[in-house]
Image (cartoon, rainbow, N blue to C red):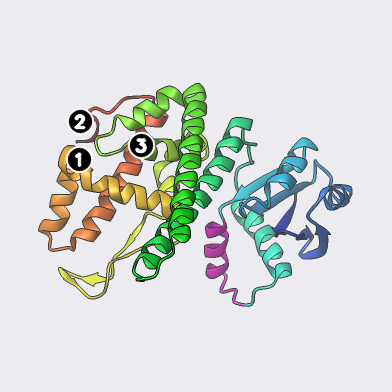
């Protein structure tokens, strides 16, 4: 089997095809013309493609390869980055990235990629749009607050910004309603099972179903936590904390933020989370560390319930 590393960006993608102990390097445009040129080089019985899940850029090529029966794997960029660090690779070029992606495939032999169902792709698009709307709303609110400090704020500015905030909020509500409608159509029971966890609300449950494609993208809870980036990094010795508490910044910040907020409620109403929080705090650790651990616990509980198709029971997590 010859492994093919693909480093993809908005305009182009670099390809490294393994042949014996060396690699041949190619560059193609990230469009149908480039896809067809790549296909001409590949033999579906001899080549296995590996690419990173690089935002929206990889999806069309992945679908094209899948439709042409080319085996491929789509890997979390964080995994490739750690692999490069282990290989002590410092120089970064698109060509070398493609080679290292192929090397990862040859060494680790990741599982075959399964194409998302249409409704999962729609949910991802809506979530991305929702994230942009959230940012716009925040910016408009901050502008209105800043201008409000001026003694000479014009009525037209205030009226315009207020109108924009209401418009964006209406769009957010419309998208959230549509996302819930789709999730209830395809994953209603799973959605309710996650929502049954004390501390986890509707919006967080919805978001977890979306980012995990209905909990089909991960083999275990550890993989999901790694993907979200919810792994506390505590630098300490004994009970003495030597530095600030750090949570892995790689991953999905919005999901982490929502789970962190959920942890505040979970330490009151979720017994397993309450016990975990108390145990960590009693050891002299900062409360932030304990809350991060609780957020991690909530994510693991969600994975267990979704994959076992069960509703929350206190005895399941004691």
Residue 70 locus on image (x, y percent): 77, 41
**Is 174 or 112 nearer to us in this picture?**
174
Which disc, if any, is residue 314?
A: 2
- Is mark 2 in CB contact (under 8 Å) with mark 1? yes
In 3D space, how far apart are the residues under numbered discs 2 and 3 (Cα atoms)? 13 Å
Q: Which circle marks residue 302 in the picture? A: 3
**Which of the two residues, 166 or 50, is positioned nearer the viewer here?**
166
Q: Position of residue 64 (x, y in %)?
A: 77, 41
Neighbour tally class for label 2: few under 14, some 14-19, many 20 plus, Cα within 10 Å: few
As measured in the structure, the alpha-carbon distance from the residue carrying label 2 to the one carrying label 1 is 8 Å
Residue 21 position within the rendered picture, expressed as x and y whole percent measured from the top left: 76, 64
Q: Earlier in the sequence, mark 2 or mark 3?
A: 3
Classify mark 1: helix, strand or loop: helix
- Check if mark 3's residue and mark 1's residue have beta carbons within 8 Å: no
Q: Left or right: where does residue 200 sit relative to residue 237?
A: right
Would residue 221 be counted in the magenta stretch?
no
Q: Which mark is residue 272?
A: 1
89 inside magenta stretch? yes
Residue 309 appears left or right of 133: left
Viewport quadrant of the C terminus? top left
Residue 268 percent location from the top left of the image:
15, 42
């Amino acid at each position: 089997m010859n492994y093919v590393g693909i480093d993809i960006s908005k305009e182009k993608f670099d390809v490294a095809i393994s042949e014996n102990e060396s690699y041949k390097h190619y560059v193609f445009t990230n469009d149908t013309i480039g896809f067809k040129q790549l296909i001409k080089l590949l033999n579906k019985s001899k080549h296995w493609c590996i690419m990173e899940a690089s935002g929206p850029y990889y999806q069309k090529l992945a679908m094209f390869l899948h439709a042409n029966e080319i085996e491929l794997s789509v890997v979390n960029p964080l995994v490739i980055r750690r692999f490069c660090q282990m290989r002590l690779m410092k120089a970064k070029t698109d060509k070398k990235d493609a080679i290292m992606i192929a090397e990862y495939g040859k060494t680790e032999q990741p599982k075959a990629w399964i194409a998302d169902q249409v409704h999962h792709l729609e949910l991802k698009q809506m979530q991305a749009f929702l994230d942009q709307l959230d940012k716009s709303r925040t910016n408009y609110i901050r502008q209105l607050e800043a201008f409000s400090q001026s003694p000479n704020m014009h009525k037209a500015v205030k009226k315009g910004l207020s109108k924009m905030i209401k418009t964006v909020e209406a769009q957010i509500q419309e998208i959230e309603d549509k996302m819930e409608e789709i999730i209830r159509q395809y994953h209603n029971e799973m959605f309710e099972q996650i929502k049954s966890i004390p501390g986890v609300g509707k919006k967080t449950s919805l978001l977890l179903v979306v980012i995990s494609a209905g909990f089909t993208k991960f083999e275990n809870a550890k993989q999901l936590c790694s993907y979200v980036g919810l792994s506390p990094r505590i630098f300490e010795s004994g009970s003495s904390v030597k530095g600030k508490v750090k949570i892995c910044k790689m991953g999905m910040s919005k999901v982490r933020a929502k789970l962190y907020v959920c942890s505040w409620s979970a330490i009151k109403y979720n017994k397993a989370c309450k016990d975990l929080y108390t145990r960590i705090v009693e050891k002299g650790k900062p409360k932030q560390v304990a809350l991060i651990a609780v957020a991690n616990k909530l994510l693991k509980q969600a994975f267990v319930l979704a994959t076992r198709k069960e509703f929350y029971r206190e005895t399941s997590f004691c």
